[in-house]
Image (spheres, rainbow, N blue to C red):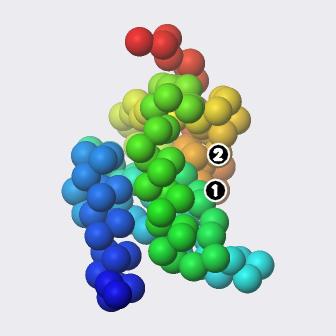
Amino acid sequence: MEDTRVELARLQREIESLLNLREAELLFEFREVDQQVRLDLVTVSPRHRQSFLFRTENGRDRRETLQRMLEYVQTYRDRDSSFTIQWRALGEPELNTSYFRAKHVYEALDKLYFGRDMHTITVYSVVLNPIA
């Protein structure tokens, strides 16, 4: 039987690899919610030093939750639409561009605003990208 910590680390590395992100660019935030484990997978942009929600998954334990996240990562490009959001952080002069996968525009904006006060970011445009 495989060590649970080793299995969790393997699943996390596989997710990082599929997303083509380094360990410092991906945060696995676990917490207990309603007797389940919730995982908020957060990406960190090294360019503008901001973090955004990639996806939330729930499961009975960390392994199941990571397995569900892995299954999503393997197919998300086929499931969700691609959005481009132009935004500026409060007090920053530079306009930034970020890309999100989401079912609809509201979900894309929720990912942008995840974990922050809505008044700290000004959104200038949200574009549904054409299917390539």
CA separation, marks 2 and 1?
11 Å
Mark carried by residue 110: 2
Residue at 34% x, 66% y is: 12
Question: Of all residues shown, which one is farthest toward the right?
Answer: 34
Q: Amino acid at mark 1?
A: Asp
Estimate the x, y position of residue 92 in percent, counting from the top left. Answer: 41, 43
Which quadrant does the N terminus fall into?
bottom left
Q: Nearer the viewer, residue 46 or 61?
A: 61
Tell me what residue is drawn at x 64 percent, y 33 percent: 103
**Front-lying residue, 125 or 105:** 105
Q: Is residue 32 above or below residue 89?
A: below
Q: Is residue 73 above or below residue 37?
A: above
Residue extending farthest front: 1
Residue 88 in view (yes/no): no
Rendered position, 75 above or below 71 = above
The image quadrant where one finds the C terminus is top left
In the image: residue 13, left or right of residue 87: left
